[in-house]
Amino acid sequence: MNTLVEIQAAVAHLPGQERKALQLWLASQNEPEYAAAEEQRLLESLDNAIRAIDDEKGISLPEVRSRVASWAAK
């Protein structure tokens, strides 16, 4: 298969479960796209987290687990 048309024709003949697996695999190949402002906020947040850890202002692992568990329950 050398062209998109050939690939599309082949995909049309895949069973549903294989088509879903291909869809998931293709989606996993994409890198997330961030807007410049969103990327900047993410980087600033990571910088703040690193500074807090360096200043020993972080929270304990048991506290993290507790918070994540409460978020997951919502």
Image: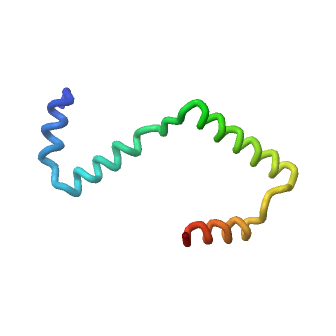
Indicate how the structure is coloured in the image: rainbow
Determine whether, in the image, residue 29 is placed left or right of residue 40: left
Determine whether, in the image, residue 47 is placed left or right of residue 21: right
Q: Residue at x 26, y 53 (%)?
A: 20
Give the percent coordinates (x, y) of residue 44. Answer: 71, 39
Camera-side residue of 33 and 50: 33
Position of residue 16 relative to residue 35, above or below, is below
Q: Residue at x 19, y 55 (%)?
A: 16
Q: Residue at x 67, y 38 (%)?
A: 43
From this viewpoint, which residue is outermost toward the right?
Answer: 55
The quarter of the picture where residue 26 lies is top left
Camera-side residue of 7 and 51: 51
From this viewpoint, which residue is outermost toward the top?
Answer: 3
Give the percent coordinates (x, y) of residue 39. Answer: 60, 36
Camera-side residue of 48 and 54: 48
Task: Name the quarter where the N terminus is drawn.
Answer: top left
How many marks do you count on the picture? 0
Q: Residue at x 30, y 47 (%)?
A: 23
Position of residue 74 relative to residue 14, above or below, is below
Give the percent coordinates (x, y) of residue 10. Answer: 14, 40
Task: Name the quarter where the C terminus is drawn.
Answer: bottom right
Camera-side residue of 37 and 53: 37
Give the percent coordinates (x, y) of residue 40. Answer: 65, 34
Determine whether, in the image, residue 12 is placed left or right of residue 51: left
Position of residue 30 relative to residue 16, above or below, is above
Position of residue 6 relative to residue 58, above or below, is above
